Amino acid sequence: MMTTAPAAVPAGSSRDWNHHPDLPIPVSPLFAWPPRPREALQWLAASWLALSMMLLEFLLAVIVYAVFLPDMATMQTVSAGWILQIWVRNLILLFLVAHSLHLYFHGFKTQGMILKFDRRQLARDNGIFTFRSQLLDNMFWSLASGVTVWTLYEAFYFWAAANGLVPLVGFSDNPLWFVIWILLVPIWSSLYFYWIHRFLHWPPLYRIAHSLHHRNINVGPWSGISMHPIEHLIYFMSFGIHLIVPSHPIHFLFHAFINGLNPSASHSGFDGLVVRDRKQVELGDFFHQLHHRYFECNYGTSEMPWDVWFGSFHDGSEAATSETRKRRSRMHARPDRPTGEPRPS
């Protein structure tokens, strides 16, 4: 077990955290105006050339397509056999990713508090969670509902693709578009997520569905897609882009793993995985960690600047915390404000 003490909190920064990245946190320069091409290329390089979840998910998509995807002839006919095969594969992948991260960070505490955002541990014997356990609650909703809805959307897409009902493109057909669409899939996922996330914070829908995800103020790997079935139906609907935009099965699988597996890393609660006193893999997303702590901010992801443009960006600073709390008070002062919402300590 690593015993190195966590680095001191930088002077002048937020004291609400055990660890945080340099503040204020940046957002993607891809859409900056005036353009900042050097910074944009550096941002893309950090996502694709370094050892990152984005790169690992793309490689996994290639492997699954080549080895584990049922052949198109089989998927022309709706059958429980091949759909169950996809469901089992998705369940195994999510379990391996989420539970490996959980055991490493929260079960065995291999990294201790090094790079851990929140000082608190995951909740136990807390009546707000199903089974009174944050871990079991998150596992149940992720596996029983999340994997099932994800699989149903995936099965529908591959059935439609096998029957020629959606536009398909191979690398040999259009190499330029094939590569560009790989780069655009994460951006589309981020864009879609911002808008549906704002919708999920609409008080009636928040109360019915999204409040289940927000039980997790202090998040762990299994919190990623721990959602109400209604939210799963909305969240995974982003796959619908492939019904109209020419795609290859690799594009779809990459998109599926971004939505299904990446949240386990971004909700890990840690800024990265440390080996031999060096951060080897970028994991946790402090941008989204701020959303779970303060609720009415950072609805999107750092890949798209929607929160900056629409005034909901929290950059991690004390001033942003104060402004977010004021905005949240104004929003929830309405008679139709969400009820039963967990509140940060």
Image (cartoon, rainbow, N blue to C red):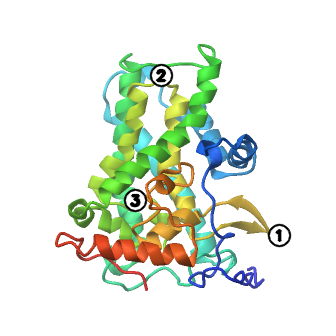
Q: Where is residue 191 in the image (x, y as percent from the top left)?
A: 46, 45
Secondary structure found at label 3: helix
Identity, as a three-letter code, of the amino acid under mark 3: Ser
Q: How many labels does the image show?
A: 3
**Between 197 and 89, which is closer to the camera in this rendering?**
197
Which badge, 2 or 1, is on the more N-terminal residue?
A: 2
Where is residue 330, by image quadrant?
A: bottom left
Q: Where is residue 252 in the image (x, y as percent from the top left)?
A: 49, 34
Residue 18 in view? yes
Identity, as a three-letter code, of the amino acid under mark 2: Pro
Where is residue 4, by image quadrant?
A: bottom right
Give the position of the N terminus as an image quadrant: bottom right
**Rendered residue at 59%/13% (across/down):** 173
Vertical relation: 224 (above or below) 120:
above
Left or right of 92 in this view: 206: left
**Between 291 and 144, which is closer to the camera in this rendering?**
291
Distance of mark 2 from mark 1, alpha carbons? 44 Å
The residue most toward the front is 34
Residue bearing the label numbered 1: 276
Q: Are marks 2 and 3 in contact (CB under 8 Å)?
A: no
Which badge, 1 or 3, is on the more N-terminal residue?
A: 3
Residue bearing the label numbered 3: 142
Residue bearing the label numbered 2: 246
Q: Position of residue 243 (x, y in %)?
A: 38, 27
Secondary structure found at label 2: loop
Left or right of 338 in this view: 20: right
